[in-house]
Structures are given as C-alpha cells and as structure tokens.
Image (tube, helix red, strand yellow):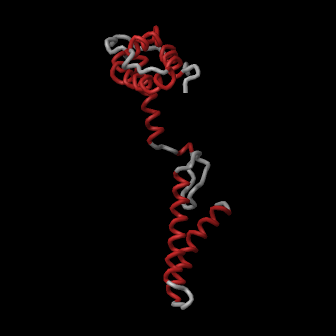
Amino acid sequence: MTSRRILILALRVATPALLILIAVTREEGVSVRMWLTGASVWIAAVLVWDLLAVAAPEPAGLRVAWRRPHRSSSYRGPVLAGLRSDVLVLRDALRDPRVHASRLRPHLASVAEHFVPLRHGFDPEQDPQRMRQLLGEVGWLLDPEETERAPTATEIDQFLTIVLADDRKGVS
C-alpha cells in the first residue's frame, strides 16, 4: 500500500473515531452544534471524494483507499464479454450470410445511425439516397433485402472507414 493510501485510510477511520470520542467524553466545551458540524463536514468530504473517484475523467484519477487495484489481465467484466461477443458475431458473419443478416447488420446500422449525422451532417433515415451514395459499393451491408451474401473483412473495413470519416467541412 502506498503512503498516500495509508493516509487516506487513516483519515477515514480517525475522523469518525474522534467524533465518537468527543460525543462520549461529555466535555462542557464541546457543544452538540460543534459535533454535528464536524460530522457534517466529514460526511460531505467523504461523499465529494467518492463522487470525484467515480466521475474521474481518467481511470488513473482518484482511487478509493479500500478498493483493490484491477489488473487488466484478470478483468472479466461486461465490456470484455461484450467485445468477445462482437468478435464472435463478426467472425461468424464473415462465413455465414444468415449471421450477417440477423446479427451483424443491426450492429452496422446502429453505427451508421449514430456516426453519419455526426460525421457527415445528414440523417440516413431522412435521406436514404444520400446514404446509398455515401456508402457506394458497400451499401449492400445495410440492405435488408440482401440475405445471401456474406461480407468480407475488407468490405467491413471500408464501411467503417466511410462511416467514421469526418466529412463536415467547417460545420460545428
């Protein structure tokens, strides 16, 4: 444990212990207001600290003292499981046209629905002609009538390159 983590843990333990000690000593100099103020400040500080730890823009930001650090090799969370699932869908879609039609096409359509308005400045549902023109020869990847053709890795790469390209010239 680093010295910083030890200090944070000590402060988290010592502050409530001190407040409890003040409450049970029955000192005349310590009023209930002072005790409540101290407890409120401590609770607010802990909540703000935890909020900053959760909302940190980078994972290397604030860390809570009592949590174990995650090791990337042992992480088996939902993101990794979802990525594994997507890789399997992609692998199977390259071999089987039915997997492309039922599982990969909806993923590609959602990518296009999200990124085309952001990157190209038009809504694919309102302007399907422009969408067909944008995608060109890989437009069949989104065509619901196409059920007998499996995509190649090159076609999927070309689709993603087109959809993710930033073509907004000076549009903000």
Judge from the rendering whether residue 40 lies leftward or rightward of residue 6; answer left or right: left
**In this view, 36 is above or below 103:** below
Expressed as whole percent of the image width and height from the top left, the position of residue 104 reads 39, 23
Residue at x 46%, y 43% (from the top left corner):
77
Q: Quadrant of residue 145?
A: top left
Instruction: Find the residue positioned furthest to the top.
Output: 137
Instruction: Choose between 42 and 1: the one closer to the eye.
Output: 42
Instruction: Find the residue positioned furthest to the front.
Output: 171
Instruction: Choose between 162 and 122: the one closer to the eye.
Output: 122
Residue at x 34%, y 11% (from the top left corner):
146
**How many labels were placed on the picture?**
0
Judge from the rendering whether residue 119 lies leftward or rightward of residue 129; answer left or right: right
Residue at x 57%, y 53% (from the top left corner):
69
Expressed as whole percent of the image width and height from the top left, the position of residue 38 reads 54, 75
**In this view, 43 is above or below 99:** below
Q: Quadrant of the C terminus?
A: top right
Residue at x 52%, y 58% (from the top left corner):
50
Expressed as whole percent of the image width and height from the top left, the position of residue 8 reads 61, 65
Instruction: Find the residue positioned furthest to the right.
Output: 3
**In this view, 17 is above or below 169:** below
Judge from the rendering whether residue 94 lies leftward or rightward of residue 73; answer left or right: left
Instruction: Choose between 1 and 36: the one closer to the eye.
Output: 36
Q: Quadrant of residue 29?
A: bottom right
Q: Quadrant of the N terminus?
A: bottom right
**In this view, 66 is above or below 27:** above
Expressed as whole percent of the image width and height from the top left, the position of residue 171 reads 55, 23
